[in-house]
Structures are given as structure tokens and as C-alpha cells.
Image (cartoon, grey):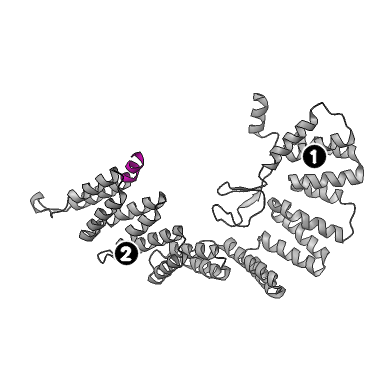
């Protein structure tokens, strides 16, 4: 019952606006048009809602819409609320009826078509939604929102060329800065070309991506991968270093590629290069690689000193895991129960996110160029370890 009361609030507000609007017609009260107050049918519909009989309520409200087109706002609100509740079939029914009304203004019809398109999207009827959005674009009604809807459809279907076309059109009509999004579409098409073995076309798409968005990290990483495939490890290493300089949040993602470049180039002493990269852009994966390099080149004692110094500055489970593992392995001073502590740390580390969307907070263990939750491009970045000087960490220490 309570959820239907919440559903009724916007409907009641819309109906109140409608009544106030019609009651405000100038002239004596005796000259007001009949029907300026909601009749029995309106309250009958509300009664059906309160008694949890939404289908009967819809029938009543749709008949009211046939009588008076000014109730369109009420029915649009009702349809949107049905959709939010997950009752898509009912939302579609409300919006379809509104679209069929000949008394709607152009703006009301445009909004009703757009809302119906959203219903179809939620129901998975992409072809119907696409048809409505295209109609809106042709009519120049709700054009920006319709173009964004088409982009959503084409993204879901991985039709990247169509995404590119719609994004370029949306950028023209709205003047929104969509360079990052457009660059990612070129990168998606470049990856498709690489899978088909058409490297020249892939390279052309990457050049387009960088021309549109000079800071496109993804394009640089793909270029580095292509150079490695061609056998040019030196150029690939330079490209990976550029990624580190321009996009430090992506260092963990490019690190395996950089290490492979150094391996092919025959570099065995890489601790100094990793240390310079680490102090410029510290991250748990880079810390781990540097610790292994130090152990190979300088021994366990130097590695333990590095890890202890790192953990004095960063509250990082990956660092704690590496330190405990090394202490137990080399027989360094350890307290009873350290093996159990290592198991606990590893359990916590296995559930810790590696990447996080800085737009919606979505957490992931692998890099996604488009956030699976909010669908923003380039918003997922590596999680950095909290510094020990962080107020939250200091507060935890005080509590402990």
C-alpha cells in the first residue's frame, strides 16, 4: 500500500497543477468551463491504485486522456513511475496510448515518443527504440536525448561506426565536448581491424583518435602493442613511457607490456628504471615489480628495507603480503602466527578492487575502457594505495 502512495504523489502533483491551471482562466466563476475539476473517473482511478489494481487504474486514466489532452503530463509521470518500478509493460501501454492521441502538442508528442523509446530500451526491444529515436531526430523533437539513446543502442550492439556517426552529430547539435568518447570509438574500430588482420586500417583509426583527443591513452597503448607485433620493442617502450607520463593511473595496465619490451631488448638490470618510474607514479603493481627486481639484483635484505619503507608511507595490502611472504621465505625475524596473518592478508587482497570508476564508484579487478555501470568512457582508473598520512588512516590508528 505504501509504495502505491509514493507512486501517487507525482500523479497528484501533476493533477493539482492541471486543476490550478484550468481554474486560473480569467472570468467569473460561473463562466468556468465544465470539467475544470477532476471528475469521479479521476478519483475512481486513484481508488484503483490504492487498492493495488494498477491495470484498472490505467484504463481509467487512459480514458481521461482521450477526453482531455491536458492530462498528458499526468500520464507521462505515471508511465515514467511504472518504468522505474520495473513494470515496463504498463509503462509501454500508457505511453503508446499517449502517442496515439491526436490532441497532443508537438512537444508533448516528442516527449511521449522519447519516453516510449526508453520503455522499449528497458524491455530489450532495441529495434523499436531505434525506430522511435530516428523519428525524433528527423522531427527535431527531443533531438539530443534521441541521439544519446541511439548511441546507447549502438554501443550495446557494438556498432562502433554508427556510434561514431551519432556522437559526431550530437556534438554538432549540442556543442558538447565528446572528443574522448569519439576517440574511444576509433580505438574500438582499430581493435576490430587488428582482429581481422588489417593493421593499416587500425593504424588510421588510431591516428584519428589521437587527432581528436591528443591525450588518448588507449590509442598510445594500442600503438605500442602494434609496434611490439612488428618487432620494434624500442619504439613500443618509448610509447609505454609516454603512457606513464600522460596517464599515471594506467601504469598498472601498461606495465606488463613495458616489461616485455625490456625483456626483448635484453635488459636484465631494470631496478633503477623501475625505481624512477615508481617514485614518479607509485602503484601496487609497480611496487611489486620493483621489489622483485631489487631482490634479483641486490638481495633480500635490500628488498625488505624497500618494502618496510614503502609500508611506512602507504597502507597497502599488496605490500604487506609481499613483506610477510619474503620474511617467511628467507627466515627473517617473524612472530608466531605470521603464516596465519599472511593468509588473512591474501584473503582481503583477493577481494580488493584494482580499478574504480571516478564517476560512479564502480569497482573492478580488470581495466574497462567503458564503465559497465554508468557507461562513461575513460573513467575507470587504478586505485592508489592510501598514504599513511591520510586522515582516515590516522583516525583508524587512533581508534586502534
What label sits on residue 322 in the rendered view? 1
Q: Closer to the camera, 52 or 265?
A: 52
What label sits on residue 171 in the rendered view? none
What label sits on residue 99 in the rendered view? 2
Specify the principal SS of the magenta part: helix
Q: Quadrant of residue 298?
A: top right
Q: From the viewer's perspective, is residue 101 above or below residue 64? A: below
Q: Quick check: can you spot residue 274?
A: yes
Q: Residues within 10 Å of mark 1 (few under 14, many from 20)?
A: many
Position in image of residue 398 (x %, y %): 66, 25
Position in image of residue 215 (x %, y %): 66, 60
Q: Most extreme residue toward the right, as rendered?
A: 298
Q: Quadrant of residue 50?
A: top left
Q: Secondary structure at mark 2?
A: helix
Q: How many marks?
A: 2
Q: Closer to the camera, 199 or 365?
A: 365
Residue interval drawn in magenta: 1-9
Question: Which residue lies at the image location 36% right of the left edge and 59% below the top edge?
Answer: 92
Decide if residue 165 is on the left or right side of residue 78: right
State how far apart marks 2 and 1 are (Cα).
Answer: 63 Å
Q: Quadrant of residue 317?
A: top right
Quarter of the rendering occupied by the C terminus: top right
Q: Secondary structure at mark 1?
A: helix
Position in image of residue 4 (x %, y %): 33, 43
Residue 127 belongs to magenta span: no
Residue 8 belongs to magenta span: yes
Q: From the viewer's perspective, is residue 76 above or below residue 198? A: above
**Dot placed on the residue nearer the N-terminal end, 2 or 1:** 2
Amino acid at each position: 500500500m505504501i509504495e502505491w502512495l509514493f507512486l501517487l504523489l507525482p500523479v497528484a502533483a501533476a493533477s493539482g497543477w492541471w486543476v490550478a491551471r484550468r481554474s486560473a482562466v480569467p472570468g467569473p466563476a460561473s463562466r468556468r468551463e465544465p470539467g475544470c475539476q477532476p471528475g469521479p473517473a479521476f478519483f475512481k482511478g486513484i481508488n484503483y491504485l490504492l487498492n493495488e489494481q494498477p491495470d484498472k487504474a490505467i484504463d481509467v486514466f487512459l480514458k481521461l486522456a482521450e477526453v482531455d489532452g491536458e492530462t498528458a503530463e499526468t500520464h507521462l509521470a505515471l508511465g515514467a513511475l511504472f518504468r522505474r518500478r520495473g513494470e515496463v509493460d504498463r509503462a509501454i501501454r500508457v505511453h503508446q496510448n499517449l502517442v496515439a492521441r491526436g490532441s497532443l502538442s508537438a512537444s508533448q508528442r516528442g516527449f511521449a515518443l522519447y519516453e516510449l523509446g526508453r520503455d522499449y530500451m528497458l524491455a530489450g526491444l532495441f529495434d523499436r527504440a531505434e525506430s522511435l529515436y530516428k523519428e525524433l531526430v528527423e522531427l527535431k523533437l527531443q533531438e539530443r536525448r534521441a541521439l544519446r539513446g541511439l548511441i546507447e543502442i549502438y554501443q550495446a550492439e557494438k556498432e562502433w561506426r554508427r556510434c561514431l556517426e551519432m556522437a559526431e552529430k550530437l556534438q554538432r547539435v549540442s556543442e558538447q565536448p565528446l572528443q574522448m568518447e569519439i576517440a574511444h570509438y576509433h580505438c574500438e574500430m582499430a581493435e576490430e581491424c587488428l582482429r581481422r588482420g588489417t593493421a593499416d586500417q587500425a593504424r588510421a583509426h588510431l591516428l584519428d583518435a589521437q587527432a581528436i583527443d591528443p591525450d588518448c591513452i588507449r590509442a598510445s597503448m594500442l600503438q605500442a602493442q602494434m609496434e611490439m607485433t612488428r618487432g620494434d620493442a624500442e619504439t613500443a617502450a618509448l610509447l609505454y613511457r609516454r603512457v606513464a607520463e600522460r596517464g599515471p593511473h594506467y601504469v598498472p595496465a601498461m606495465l606488463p607490456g613495458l616489461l616485455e619490451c625490456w625483456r626483448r631488448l635484453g635488459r636484465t638490470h631494470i631496478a633503477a628504471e623501475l625505481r624512477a618510474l615508481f617514485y614518479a607514479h607509485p602503484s601496487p603493481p609497480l611496487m611489486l615489480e620493483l621489489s622483485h627486481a631489487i631482490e634479483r639484483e641486490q638481495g633480500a635484505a635490500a628488498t625488505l628495507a624497500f618494502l618496510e619503507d614503502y609500508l611506512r608511507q602507504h597502507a597497502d595490502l599488496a605490500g604487506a603480503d609481499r613483506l610477510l611472504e619474503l620474511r617467511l621465505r628467507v627466515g627473517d625475524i617473524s612472530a608466531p602466527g605470521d603464516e596465519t596473518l599472511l593468509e588473512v592478508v591474501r584473503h582481503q587482497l583477493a577481494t580488493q578492487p584494482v580499478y574504480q570508476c571516478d564517476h560512479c564508484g564502480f569497482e573492478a579487478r580488470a581495466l574497462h575502457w567503458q564503465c559497465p555501470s554508468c557507461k562513461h568512457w575513460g573513467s575507470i582508473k587504478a586505485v592508489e594505495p592510501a598514504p599513511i598520512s591520510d586522515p582516515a588512516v590516522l583516525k583508524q590508528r587512533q581508534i586502534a
